[in-house]
Structure formats: structure tokens, C-alpha cells
Amino acid sequence: MNAVIQTILIGIVIGALYGLVGLGFGLIMGVMKFVNIAHGSFIIIGGYIAYWVFTLWGVDPFLSIPAVMFVMFFMGLILYRLVLSPLLKYPRAEMRIDKSLLVTFGVTWILDNVVTMLWTSDTRSIVTAYTGTTFNVFGARLGLTGLIGLVIAVLVAVALQLLLTRTYFGKHVRAATEDSGAASLSGVNVQRTYLISCGIAAAMAGVAGVVIVSCYSIAPSMGLSWLLTAMVVIVLAGEGNIAYMLPAGLILGLIQAISTLFISCAYQQPISLIIFILVLMFKPNGLFARGR
Amino acid sequence: MAHWKKLSILTLILALLAIVPLVMELGSNVMNVMVTLFIYIILAQSWNLIGGYTGQVNLGIVAFFGISAMVTHFLWKAGAPIYLAIPTGSLSSVVLAALIGLPTLRLRGMYFAVGTLALAQAAQTIVANIFTRSVSMPGSFSATYSLMPRYYLGLIMVVIAITVVYVITRTKIGLAMVAIRDDEQAAQVTGVRVFKYKVIAFLISGILAGLAGGLYAYVRLSFWQISIVFSPSWTFDALLAVVIGGAGTLAGPVIGSVFLVVISEIFANTLGQAHLILFGLLFILVVIYFPYGLIGSVDRIHQLITRVRK
Amino acid sequence: MLEISHIDVYYGDLQALWDVSLTIGDGEIVTLVGSNGAGKSTLMKTISGLLKIRAGYIDCDSIRLDRLPVHRIVEQGISMVPEGRRIFPQMSVLENLEMGASINPARKVRQHTLKRIYELFPILKDRAKQLAGTLSGGEQQMLAIGRALMSQPKILLIDEMSLGLSPLLVQEFCRVIKGINKLSKLTVFLVEQDVQLALSMAHRGYVIENGRIVGQGEAKELLCSEEIKEAYLGMEKADKT
Ligand SMILES: Nc1ncnc2c1ncn2[C@@H]1O[C@H](COP(=O)(O)OP(=O)(O)O)[C@@H](O)[C@H]1O
Ligand SMILES: [Mg+2]
């Protein structure tokens, strides 16, 4: 019984993180129809910034989140200005998607190499005074860092949802998502909406990175596997369904946690791939899609 | 250029490549570079077929390269002759291509891209978990190691790869591929069986990537960690070669590979890892600003100038 | 006053408009008639900035429009109801209307504008919380017009208002458009395939064929002209009957 609760706890904690990882990626994909392969690298960089701030100045990783978000926000703006916005000149949507796949793959290549040069390819994690602290939940153990990560993931998801539904900017984002041409005809500055969305997506990647480096660990080569996680979450939630990203992440987390009871956790990535393929084959519009 | 003129230049290059190593001592450095070049050309042509001609962005071509390299290596080690090991390796690439292609090629392009990327990642993880120690061919193989047969096998494979791409792109399949790339919906509407031709292109691309992987296993006898045959850098290099040379052209991947290998030789020693970053920047610039590749763009500018003169 | 002078417009390498010139005076209802594929929508999209011109210029009250991005053209007081309505189906009716007031000055007075639009189309008020995608065709057209009016435009461009609507609804829309034109001095530029309808509403009209303006005049004159009757109203020439 304890083992079951423990598994569910682990699944929820990591699943919320998966949802967080999917959010930023899904935002860019939904709004701009660009696939940002570099999202995983952004996550890793966010983690390394927190790691740096912690080792250099001893700042608690969760307290460094605002600073990380700030830096990553600007990285997102730069990504949009230098790499993504030039692609808008291509008239056909498929063409833009293909080009975005290629250029962001190139960005990933650059970032991963830069990260390796700056921090070597070693695996890093942040160990604070409270890292080992755990609580007893119905006989199972819940780590403090994991709990903080869970709270942060939920807070970010709720904040994004409020932003999208309650603010003018958020509504602009949704309008541009549905029909960018009609949005611009309504007076929405679509380019600016894209720019800021990109910044927000990168900032969310940064938050995910901080949670990862505090609860688990990071290495330059992990970017692509986090990207895969983001992709699986998107596929589960259904493209553009920002509201379902967190539940989708939780489902993925639980599936993985349960699978580790039977299969070594070294094989989580192949399991993600299999889930990805199965969902695409049987539920290509996501788990939550009603029959259309 | 007239057809026969092109053909005679090609024959000349081929003859040179075939004869020079026989009459001149090139040294193992040059031979190594040449064999590496051959691997790149084959892999780049493989990417060109699916990415350049058919417009399906494969971000995990290394999966097909890697599995073939591994299968070839182990079969060869188990005693199979290399001329059987490499084709079997290629066959395994095709099987893998079918596994990932059939579910993803039906859907929008990005699922294929991410699916292939994920496949490559998963393959690397699985292999790294299974083979934690170094693998290598028995000592007798390295005692008799010679680059000559590798060079010639590589040259033959390059000719095969280029011929395959040449022939396919001039058949009905090739027309369908280009139609799919240019406008998938329009192709569908005009009766092209989009999914079928995507799969055909992808499987043939898989064979070619498999050949490149097999050749690599033939050239490299020992691996500190065999999971490096799944390193994403193979994918990136293939993409870079195609994009720089010009995607969807026969000569582009060849020219791009030559460019890449030469530049690597020059910069790898002086700049170290920083040269990879330069490559990344170059790649992005070319994708955004030179959609026909560096070579193709020079060609286009030339055409424009001559048109203006007339 | 909107002035379009000798513009050429292309889709890639394909030319769609040749040397098109026209003017629309303040407070006028002007219509552009032409058969399917003549270039009516192309001209509309060009005025609103979705397409760029390769020659000529477009001025509005001596401000050059053709170099501005789409949302800045809306700021200049030009708002378009696009062909096919293009509402945001996954957003509520109210949110759709709010989107129309995206530019700054309109946003400040949006509650006031909203009230006026609810007066014009009371049904939108009842449906305010409903997703726009669930509205009927006629209601969607109301929403599209309402959204365009939310930016408080000087000039309203409407592309194919009557498409797919019942004759009764079309009459209703005509009444509303004429009403706003009279009361609020809103200039209207109307594109229609239903030539009879368009010319009966408008003060003046232009005729476009194969991307070129081939005729213009007072709406009443055009309605009586033999060429128009023959080409667009399905009537034969008077001397034959
Ligand atoms: N997106 C496009 N790409 C290429 N050609 C187009 C496009 N849209 C319209 N056209 C062409 O431009 C011409 C005018 O089209 P349009 O302005 O839509 O006509 P109308 O609205 O009068 O029916 C037509 O010949 C049409 O084929
Ligand atoms: Mg039209």
C-alpha cells in the first residue's frame, strides 16, 4: 500500500513538472505555429543560471526564480527577433514550420555547445540545507523540494491561464492563435504579441529548469530529452490546449511512475516515445479532444 | 551545361578518385579524411531524399545511421563477412524507419520531425544503458587494418547513393516527392498518394543512412562507447551539409559535405569546440537567408546577372 | 478621404491588380462590383494592409497607408470585415468584440462603443458569454461587423456581407449599414457579388474586371447602364428584348 502511494506521489510531483515543461513549448507552438526545438536547451540554461547564482553567491535556487525568469525572458525576445521573426516572410504555414524546426535545431546545437563549454558536460544539481528533507504523507515520503516544485508548477500554470483569459494581452495571444490575420485586422499588433509570447515561453522554460536542477539534476545533453517530454505533453493535451497542459503532464508523470515499478527508470525516454506514438496513432487530437 | 559535358566531368572526377590512391601514396590522414567525406556524402544524400526532395524534416537521421552501424559491427564481429553485414545493417535501418514513419508520416510534418528526433534520443539512451563498456573488433582485425578497401567501398557506396537519388528523382516517385514538398494539400487534391510516397522516400532514405552507418562500422573498429554512433552531431552534420550545398539538388549534398569536411579540418584544431558554434550560426544563417543553399544562391545570383545583361 | 492611386498588387509573381485608382469621399457609401475572381477581395486586403503594393500609393487624409503594418492602418481609422467573417470561434462573443477595440483610443471607450453595438445587434448582448463558434451564420456576420466597429473607424470596409445569408437578413444588414452611415457619418466601402443589392445601397460604384477598374459612376446610373445589366444583373440588352 505504501509503495502505491509513494508511486502516485512521485508521479504527481514529476507530472506537474512535465506540465510546466510543456507550457512554454505549447505556447509558442499554439500562437506562432513554430516548433521550438530549443525549448529543452532553454530549460537547461535556466537550470544552469540558478546553479551559477547558487554556487557563486549562495542564493537559494527558488529565490532566484524571478532573476532566472527575467534573463530567460530576454533570451526569448532574442530568439524571436533573430531567428523566428525572419521566418514570417515565408507565406505558407508548412514552410514556416519546417524552417522553424531547422533553425531552432540549429539554435539547440549552438546552445548545447555553449553550455558544455561554460559548465562542462558533467551532471549538476543544487544541494541546499533542506534538500533531503521529507514529509510523511500516508506513510509515503514526499521531498520538500519536490513539494515546492509542485507548488511552483501549479502556480505558473494558473498564472498563465489567468493571463490568457483575464488580460487584454492574453486575449490578443488567443486571438492571434486562432487567426493571426483577423487579429491584425482587429488592430492587434501581432508581431509584438509573438515577441512577448516568446519571452514568456522562455521564462517558463527557465522556471522549469530551476525546479529540475533543485529536485533532480541537469546536464547539457538533457535538453533534447526534456524537449521530447514537452512534445509528449503537447500531444496528450492536444495542440494549442494550454489549459490541459498540466493535467496532461500529470497523466504522463503517473504513467512513468507506475512503469518504473516494472521497468528500470533508465528507460523512461523510450517509454515517452512509445506513449507519443500510441497517442498519435489513436488520439491524434489529444486525450481531451471531444469527437470532432 | 550540356548533358554530355556534365557527364564527362563527373566521369573524370570519378576516374581521378579511383586511380589516384593506386598510383600515389596519399598517407593515412588524407585517406581518413576522404573516407569521412564519403560517409558524409552518403548520409547527406539520405537526408536530401527525405528532407530536400520530399520536404519532411528528419531530425533523427542518426537513428538509422546508428542502428546500421551497430548491427554491422556485431554481425561482423560474429563472423559474418562485411559484404553481408552492411546490407543487413541497412535492412535494420529500414525496419526502424517503418516503425517511426508509419505512425508519424500520416500527420503534420512536425510530428515526423519530433518523432524522428525522439527516436534518435531513445535509441541512444537504450544503447547506452545496454552497452556500458567499450566494444571493439578482435585484435586480428586491427592488425590487418588497411584504409584501401574502406576507401574503395566508400567510393562505390557514394556512387550508388548518388545514382539512387538521381534515378528516383527522375521517376514518377520523384515527381510525387517534389509535389508533396511544394504543396502537400495540392498534391493530395491532384491525386498524389501522399502518404505512400512519403513512406517510400523515407524507407529509401533509411537504406542510404544505413549504408553510411555500415561503412562507418567498417572503418571504425573500436568504440569506447558504442552509443556515440547515435550522437546527434551526425544528424546536425548531415543537415548542415545538405542545407549549405542546397537541399533538393543532386550536387548540393556533395558540395556541402566537401565544404563541411574541409572547414572542419581547418578549424577543429585551431578553434576546438567553438568551431561547432560557428557551424551552428552558419546553419541558421543559411536556413533563414539562403533557402537554396550557399551554392544554389550563388547560382541564382549568377542567373539574375546574366538575365539583367540580356 | 481615402485615395488609391495607380496601384499594382501581386501574389508572389502573379499580378492580381493593374493600375487601380479610386477615391472614397467622407460619408459616402461606395461599392466595388465585379464577378468572382475579379480582384475585389484583393483590393480590400490591400487597403487594410494584408497585401503590399508594388506601385502607386494609398492615402487616407494625406497619410500614406501602404507602408504601415495592418494594426497601424486600423489606428488610422480603417477597419475591415473580412470575407468569410473570420471571427475567433474559440473566444466568447464579448471577447471577440473586445478584440475589435485593441487599438489604444478605442480601448479606452470600449464600454461605450459596446453599448452602441448591442443597440445595433441586440442578439449579441444575449449571446455575450457564448463561444463565437456556436453562433449562426447571420449572428457571426453581426459579430464580424460589430468587431470591426469596435475600433471606432472612419471607414468601414465590408467584403461579401451577403454571402450565405437569407434575403431577409441581408435586408436587415443593409438597413443597419445605411443607418450608421447616416447617423455616424461612417464612410463605407462595400464589396458585393450581389450587384443589384450593392448598387441600391451605395452612392457611387466602381466596376472591376480582371484586376482592372473598367467603369465607375453614380450608383443609380450604373444600375441603369446596359453593360452592367448585361454583365452582372443577368438581363439582356434592352434593344434585344
Ligand atoms: N492567396 C492567393 N494567391 C494567389 N492568387 C490569389 C490568391 N487569392 C486570390 N488570388 C487570385 O487573385 C485574383 C483575384 O482574387 P479575389 O480578389 O479573391 O477575387 P474576388 O474577391 O473578386 O472574387 C483571382 O484570380 C485569384 O485567383
Ligand atoms: Mg472575394
Image: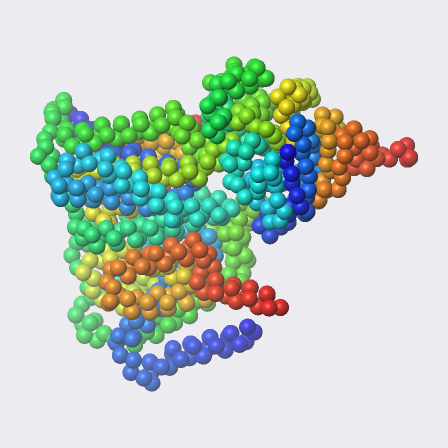
Residue A124 vs residue A9, the one in the foreground: A124
**Residue B94 x/y as whole percent:** 38, 55
**Residue A36 x/y as whole percent:** 36, 44
Q: Please, which colouring scheme is shown?
A: rainbow
Res C153 quadrant in image: top right
Residue B248 vs residue C34, the one in the foreground: C34
Residue A130 vs A110, above or below: the answer is above
Q: Work out which residue is located at the far front of the displayed protein and give it.
A: C62
Rendered residue at 44%/48% (across/down):
A87
Rendered residue at 22%/27% (across/down):
A151
Decide if residue B152 is on the left or right side of residue A57. Answer: right
Q: In the picture, which quadrant includes the C terminus of chain B?
A: bottom right
Q: In the picture, which quadrant includes the N terminus of chain B?
A: bottom right
Res C187 quadrant in image: top right
Decide if residue B194 is on the left or right side of residue B221. Answer: right
**Residue A21 x/y as whole percent:** 29, 37
Decide if residue B149 is on the left or right side of residue C149. Answer: left
Q: Is residue C211 visible?
A: no
Rendered residue at 40%/65% (across/down):
B256
Rendered residue at 21%/54% (across/down):
A117
Residue B14 vs A202, above or below: the answer is below
Q: Work out which residue is located at the far bottom of the displayed protein and give it.
A: B23
Decide if residue A2 is on the left or right side of residue A179. Answer: left
Q: Work out which residue is located at the far left of the displayed protein and give it.
A: A129
Q: Is residue A122 visible?
A: yes
Residue A261 vs residue A82, the one in the foreground: A82
**Residue C235 x/y as whole percent:** 82, 32
